[in-house]
Image (cartoon, helix red, strand yellow):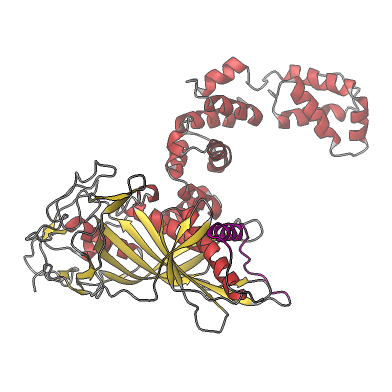
Amino acid sequence: MAAPVLRWGCSGTCSALAWVYGVSRRRRGAPTGSTSNWIRGQSSLAQQPLHTARKPRKGEHEWAAVVGLEIHAQISSNSKLFSGSQVCFAAPPNSLVSFFDASLPGTLPVLNRRCVEAAVMTGLALNCHINKKSLFDRKHYFYADLPAGYQITQQRLPIAVNGSLTYGICVGKTRRQVTARTVRVKQIQLEQDSGKSLHDDLRSQTLVDLNRAGIGLLELVLEPDLSCGEEAATAVRELQLILQALGTSQANMAEGQLRVDANVSVHHPGEPLGVRTEVKNLNSIRFLAKAIDYEIQRQIKELEDGGEILNETRSFDYKLGCTVPMRDKEGKQDYRFMPEPNLPPLLLYDATSLPAGADSQQVINIDQIRERLPELPSVTRERLVQQYGMLPEHSFTLLNEVGLLEFFQNVIKETRAEPKKVTSWVLNTFLGYLKQQNLAVRESPVTASALAELLDLLDSKAISSSAAKQVFEELWKNEGKTPSQIVSEKKLELMQDQEALEQLCHSVMQGHPQVVMDVKKGNPRAINKLIGLVRKATLSRADPAVIKATLEKQLSCHGSCPPA
């Protein structure tokens, strides 16, 4: 059968278990009390820390947590998966809806080439096997914002299978050591998004916005190789970086472009896996970690108290910090999957199977897409470590903070300072100010050029390190002044008059004879006090190393030599 017609839509080794130990087993009766009491109990449980990786005490029982993820990423495309409707966030309700999106009779799907290429590129980046033949299916279920009564997806034969996602997680007492872990990717499939229901509680009505209906999604199913919220959050963040590097999805969780469902269960090691619950629609990496850790604790407590875990769907209440039931899954829904009759099999080719004379506009070449793969985050980190000599954990921070790597590279281009000094200033001073003010990199009042100029002043020994921090603080006030102007106005230049510095050192030594005696007696801290007194006298305008050398020279004369 011929491949479906394609439409252009351009782009605008793992530790599977963590040991978790619950409290001593005790029985309890049926739950009593009001719903508010139950909610308070759930909220208090959310405050309890997750205990992992320690030996059980007497009377405690080992538990192993198993976590699997299903991730929906909105494909970065100008138009929808099967229609020509525009994709635009926050457009007026129902303003971007085609006849096909509204499921009018007689309308037919036309596959978006851009979405297929995005799926192939994502699969290649995640080490997947790309199926040269994949199928589309109808998944039937009724919901108000699904006008057709079914979703077009790829249940039987998805476009990519059997991949892996490697991510780094911080371990050790100081959490500065990064270790690599891997989660298997079961499959990646193309499917269309549903619309959005807007609930008006004041008027007791629900309104439907179909702008989102039909937007192309990548559903990525990860095997249950994760064991806690931190691992899940780190894996999703790594996936987010990969999607953004590829350009296949903007993966902005705040705009719903990356949504995560987590399947969580606990069991005793060596026993069958426990009953799992599904926590739906997690749209924040921080909430993802909290929801999973809470759900692990909740299930352990429930089993330790003699209860049972229900196979149910839950949601995460971020205000209470706990998961709450949505609906049970005991009666498994029959989605009545069937082949999509209006879409033939999707056929892909590589260099060896490409038909002679094939129209390049109607054929997708896997090898050509492979050649277009950009530098992935893992490769970028390795390059940063090798090129600039930074620690691996510093490379992770540069990539994890949105826009920070670009800022760092711009500073590097414009300054003569050593890369290690740039790294220190960007990760400690600059990032510290951002976090203190809760700002994104793009919102920073200090530009990369300004920081580069400041580091040049510091590198040329025109100012001291303490003066540089004062200059940075003034730059943060965003008064439109350059570092050089601030240094001149505040008179922060380093003292260049060696004779004047020697006079100051001599005066300080004469004024503090007891400290001088302590230095002579071999007290190593005493000279630091003298250095501090001289710096205070110079308003921090003298280089501490020069001060120390001058003091040591005069001390060698036993304090009796007059200054030069």
Would residue 43 be found to the left or right of residue 207 on screen?
right
Rendered position, 443 above or below 420: above
The picture places residue 474, in percent across and down from the top left corner, at: 56, 24
Image quadrant where one finds the C terminus = top right
* Residue span colored magenta: 33-57
Q: Quadrant of residue 42?
A: bottom right
In the rendered image, residue 47 lying in the magenta stretch gets the answer yes
The picture places residue 333, in percent across and down from the top left corner, at: 31, 74
Is residue 13 visible in the rendered image? The answer is no
Image quadrant where one finds the N terminus = bottom left
Residue at (36%, 55%) from the top-left corner? Answer: 258
Which one is in front, 500 or 405? Answer: 405
Would residue 513 be found to the left or right of residue 181 on screen?
right
Residue at (23%, 49%) from the top-left corner? Answer: 211
The picture places residue 209, in percent across and down from the top left corner, at: 25, 49
Residue at (69%, 74%) from the top-left corner? Answer: 24
Is residue 111 visible in the rendered image? The answer is yes
Rendered position, 203 above or below 49: above
In the rendered image, residue 461 lying in the magenta stretch gets the answer no
Q: In which quarter of the image is residue 186?
A: bottom left
The picture places residue 173, in percent across and down from the top left corner, at: 66, 59
Rendered position, 562 above or below 289: above
Would residue 524 be found to the left or right of residue 541 on screen?
right
